[in-house]
Amino acid sequence: MKIAGLFVLLVGCSFFFSSCDKTPGYGGNCGITGVVKIRKFNTNYSVLREETVLANADVYIIFQDGQGYGDKVKTSYDGSFNFNHLVPGDYKLFVYSNDTTLVSSSQIPITIPVKISKNKELVNAGVLKTADNSPIKGNATISGNVTGHKLGASYTAIHEKMYLTDMLDSTNTNTSYTDYSGNYTFNSLPIGKYKIYVYSKNTVATPPYLLLDTIVTISKNNDVVKNINFDVND
């Protein structure tokens, strides 16, 4: 009887302690921290133009597979995030991102597993990277002047149409017109390489117009590139 009673007591204690084990979630003294960054590409994701921290982004945490996400937090100004008051266990974090393979037109989750092994542990999940191919704006400027020639006389090229093509993304083009002084400007340009061009009448052969162009490199976000000048025929 004593042996049987001891067996029942041990089984009962084992059941009691196993039932008290906490599943992943809140109620503990652990935490998970990390950073979210955004990678900015050209239209077809063939060129990485910029990588920077992403503020005010949603970061989701999954407590158990198959039950959806348990909670979400916003990243701070420096892209950092924190989940606090967690118990030890296995978790998953994810952020939404554009699909760089172009298979899906919808956003897809970028997931990273995180394991908390013991109480009072703060786990650094590292960096979660999202992707985007939207046109980006910068603070750089390219400007210049256009003069013209007609019947041997020079003149100020007013309302001359100027073109800019992004060499890292040929689908990103822009136009500008010269003012009454023959000056033109392209503003809000990000770091990159650009082709500036204008069409000039071909006075010696066909085709009737020639493309005059030059390549300009923007190496800093606030670059001011001046005196990209052209001389056209009319």
Image (cartoon, rainbow, N blue to C red):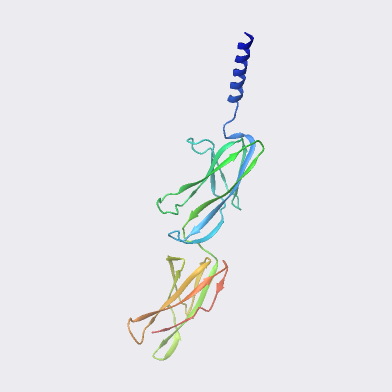
Toward the viewer: 185 or 101?
101
What residue do we see at 52% from left, 56% from top?
39
Estimate the x, y position of residue 216 in percent, counting from the top left: 50, 73
Which image quarter is the C terminus in? Answer: bottom left
Residue 12 image point, x, y percent: 60, 18
118 or 35, which lies in front? 118
Question: How many circles with numbers are drawn on the protein?
Answer: 0
Rendered view: 4 above or below 220: above
Residue at the extreme bottom: 152
Q: Is residue 8 shown left or right of residue 100?
A: right
Relative image position of residue 193 (x, y in whole percent): 50, 69
Q: Residue at x 48, y 74 (%)?
A: 215
Which residue sits furthest front?
3
Q: Nearer the viewer, residue 65 or 198?
A: 65
The image quarter in which residue 222 lies: bottom right
Residue 53 lies left or right of residue 199; in this view the side is right
- Give how far across and how far down residue 195 sits, in percent: 46, 73
Residue placed at 33% from the left, 85% from the top? Answer: 205
Is 22 displayed left or right of 40 in the figure? right
Instruction: Indicate whether 119 appears above or below 144.
Output: above
Q: In the image, is residue 18 above or below residue 56? A: above
User: Quick check: 89 above or below 158?
Assistant: above
Q: Among all residues in the image, which is located at the extreme right?
A: 120
Question: Residue 91 versus residue 232: which sits nearer the camera?
Answer: 91
- Seen as rendered, the residue at the extreme top is 1
Name the quarter where the N terminus is drawn.
Answer: top right
